[in-house]
Structures are given as structure tokens and as C-alpha cells.
Amino acid sequence: MKWTIGEAVWRLLHPEPEAAGVDGSDGPHAAASLASAPGQPEAAASLASAPGLPEAAALLASAAGGSAAGAGSAPLSAGADGLLAGDPQRTLTGIAVSFAASLDALERARDAGANLLVAHEGLYFSHQADAAWTAGSAAAQAKRRRIEASGIAVCRWHDGPHRLRPDVITAGLVRRLGWEDAVIRTLPEATIIRLPEPLSAAAAAELAKRRLGASGVRAAGDLAHPCRTVAVTVGYRGGGELAARLYEEHGAELLLAGEGPEWEAPEYVRDAVRLGRRIALLYVGHAASEQPGMELAAERIGRLLPGVPVLFLNERDGIQII
């Protein structure tokens, strides 16, 4: 079937209730996922005639046009997600999926024949789409004009995949690391792994670099101790409070995270090791930790929108280790 951009975005932002999963489920396959819930193809096929969709398209159109507050606009739905740029009435030709809504990703999407980019992060260098400071940013305004000229629509899908159980972004990282079969518990903010064979933090760092294509990771703690229980988190979930809970309540010997405040978890680990604990911390980077999840999201979007070409764009990290 043919979809408009607005219909596709609406479908993405409003999955079937059973697809949302349940918080705190145990094991890797305990909860329903966005693409595997019963009846998804039928639900997608009937979306075009669903009550309220014209009104939704109108709302999407108003949300995508920019605002006086900033270079972008507040998205249609609550939280960060929504159509941030583009015409929802246009026929969808294809979807590109990326971690960042970078100009590079936009150009690659256009070259591939897609006219909708689904990105995990925002357009204008801020978590908030309508951040007031972007209205005065020359770079943000130039990027907005480039997007308008390209005809590419941009949808942010950040909160949605994190709210699914298991969290799609974390599940993607676990899959990329090859630890899917070792999952013993999925939490809203982390996945607990019980490795079949012990692995030192130093060896885990080499594994992460190889699997994620990273030039390096940041480490703290006892890097030689053979670890069996690993906690995996993504993005900015590497702070002290969560780290302490994962180490103390869930028995993690190693925490592999995206990033976090340097004065929190790394200092916790340093003092804990001084006090006799054998634990370690690896920061693989925000983008490196979440790109695999967006690759998994792209696969699910493809099943959610039958007949639509979906392409995952693997981007180079915006921060390089030199």
C-alpha cells in the first residue's frame, strides 16, 4: 500500500498497545515488541482509514513548520518524538534511519531515494526541538533552510524505542555485542548479562571496539578481573545513581555504558576498587552505544510499514578519539 509521510509517522508514534511491552520483564524475549505483536500487518493496512488520521495529519503539518521559539518546533506527541520537518501530505517514497539527524544523513537519505529520515536525536543541536537559543544560531538556521530545500521530512523517534520492553536501543547494543543469549534480566534502563565464560573488562573493551567500529573506549576500575555479570546501558545512562544500583543490587562486575558525568560513576568505581571491590566501567560513547539500536529499529520499522523501503544509515561518530 501507499503511505503518506504523515500516516507513516503517525503509525510509528502510535504503535498498538500490546506492542509497548511491560516494564521490568525478565529474559530477552519476555515482552512483546513493536514489530512482533499479533495483528501488526492488519493494523498497518487499515491505518489510512483510521478515524482521526486527517486531523493527525493536520497536526503533524503544523508541528513540522518551525516555530518562533527556535529553529525547530515542538513535536506533535508528548516528549521528544514527532515530525520536526517536512510535508506530512507527501507520498512516502522510502525511509532512512539514523542515530543523528545530521546533514550527512539527510544527504545520504535523499541520494537513496528516501524522503523521510527517522533519527534518534534531534535536528538542531539540542534535546528540545523548540529550544529558544537555536533561533539565533546561524548554523541552526542554515541547516533548517537546507532541509526545507531538500524536501526531506525528519521524524525524531527517541522516547518511543526507549519505552518499549525490552528497550529497542539497548537490545540493539546487546545484539551487536553478541550477548543476546546471555541476557538474564531486562530492566527499563539496563540489561543484565550473565556471560557463559568470564571476560575481563580489558577484553570486553576490545570486543566493544571491534563490534562497534570504535577507535577506543574509556575505562575505570579493575580491568583485569574476570567478569561474569555485566550490566549494559546506552546513551546517557552512565551516571552514578544508576551505576551504584547495578553494581550493588544486581551484582554487576562490569558496567558497559554510553556515557555519563565523569565525576559520578567513574569516581564511584575508583573508590569502590580502593575499598576492595573488583568492578569496572566502560564508556563506549553515546552514539556508538545507540547506533546498533537504531539499526534494530530500522528492521522493526520495515515490518511495521509493509512495502516501504527502509534503509539504515551507519554514521561515523561525531566525536573522534585522536
Image (spheres, rainbow, N blue to C red):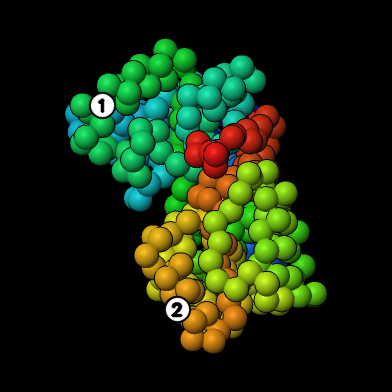
Query: For this view, does 91 lie left or right of residue 113?
Result: left
Element under label 2? helix
Q: Quadrant of the C terminus?
A: top right
Figure quadrant of residue 227: bottom right
Residue at the limit of the structure toward the top, as seen here: 149
Element under label 1? loop
Query: For this view, does 120 lie left or right of residue 288?
Result: left
Mark closer to the chain start, 1 or 2: 1
Q: CA distance from mark 1 to mark 2?
A: 42 Å
As drawn, 87 above or below 204: above
Question: Local crowd at mark 2 within 10 Å, few (<14), some, or many (≥20)?
Answer: few
As drawn, 261 above or below 49: below
* Place of residue 226 in the rendered image (x, y in percent of width and height, measured from the top left): 71, 76
Residue at 53% over, 45% down: 287
* Place of residue 93 in the rendered image (x, y in percent of width and height, measured from the top left): 60, 22
As drawn, 234 above or below 143: below
Query: In this rendering, which labeled residue sits more in front, label 1 or label 2?
Result: 2
Of 230 and 302, nearer the camera is 230
* Place of residue 172 in the rendered image (x, y in percent of width and height, measured from the top left): 65, 53
State yes or no: discs 1 and 2 in contact (Cβ < 8 Å): no
Residue corresponding to mark 2:
271
Question: Local crowd at mark 1 within 10 Å, few (<14), some, or many (≥20)?
Answer: some
Residue at the limit of the structure toward the bottom, as seen here: 276
Residue at 72% over, 56% down: 207
The type of residue carrying mark 2 is Asp
Residue corresponding to mark 1:
137
